[in-house]
Image (tube, grey):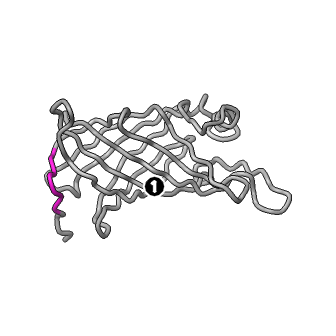
Amino acid sequence: MTQQPTIPGYLTGTWTIDPGHSEVSFTVRHLMMTRIRGRFSRFSGQLTTAANPLESRVSAEIDMASIDTNNAARDADLSSGNFFDIETFPVMTYHSTSLEPDGDAFLLRGDLTCHGVTAEVPLRLAVNGFGTGRFGDRRAAFTATGELSRKAFGISLDLPLDGGGVVIGDRIEIGLEIQAVLG
């Protein structure tokens, strides 16, 4: 039996992600030598913190049309049928399935649905704290990181480079900075 973790200031309840104080971002290799960073500006979700933290759950939705890599032409290509095909698949979702201790953090396992494909994507989750916001509301903050293969989600366009390799890498690094409000 896994021992229940102790988290300072921990509060149970249902929390709503505050998009104004949160970030959903990603990084991918470009031309096999640099890393392009991007983000999604429209997303929503809820976290339920249970009496036993390991029974807590997360669900989230991301509006795929809100992709921003700081390059309008690239964003249009990523939104097209070449990659995300947002006309057919406008939303990406994540639903956690389990939470377990992982050193000084947690391993959050969940199902990510993107481009019509659902696959498990584990995230390393750090609890940054629980506290009171400027206006007396209760807040919680988390950082989550992970990695996925875009090809596992049927996004398989490879544009070869003359010297070998491809224009866009397969591995996508995920970075989440989440602040949520209780109630």
**What is the chief secondary structure element of the magenta stretch?**
loop
At x 15% / y 47%, what residue is drawn?
A: 11
Q: Position of residue 28 (x, y in %)?
A: 61, 52
Picture quadrant where residue 108 is located: bottom left
Mark 1, residues whose alpha carbon is within 10 Å: few (<14), some, or many (≥20)?
some
On the picture, is 82 further left or further right than 88? right
Q: Position of residue 83 (x, y in %)?
A: 66, 41
On the picture, is 28 further left or further right than 15? right
Q: Kindly identify the amino acid type of the residue bearing the numbered disc 1.
A: Glu
Q: Quadrant of the N terminus?
A: bottom left
Residue 78 magenta: no
Q: Position of residue 121 (x, y in %)?
A: 45, 55
Q: Which residues are magenta?
A: 6-12
Height in image: 72 above or below 140?
above
Work out which residue is located at the far front of the displayed protein and give it.
Answer: 134
Picture quadrant where residue 47 is located: top left
Height in image: 161 above or below 58?
below
Q: Position of residue 144 (x, y in %)?
A: 39, 53
What number of labels is visible?
1
In front of the other: 9 or 80: 9
Work out which residue is located at the far right of the displayed protein and give it.
Answer: 162
At x 28% / y 53%, what residue is drawn?
A: 128
Q: Quadrant of the C terminus?
A: top left
Provide the residue designation for mark 1. Answer: 120
Height in image: 85 above or below 34?
above
In front of the other: 113 or 40: 40
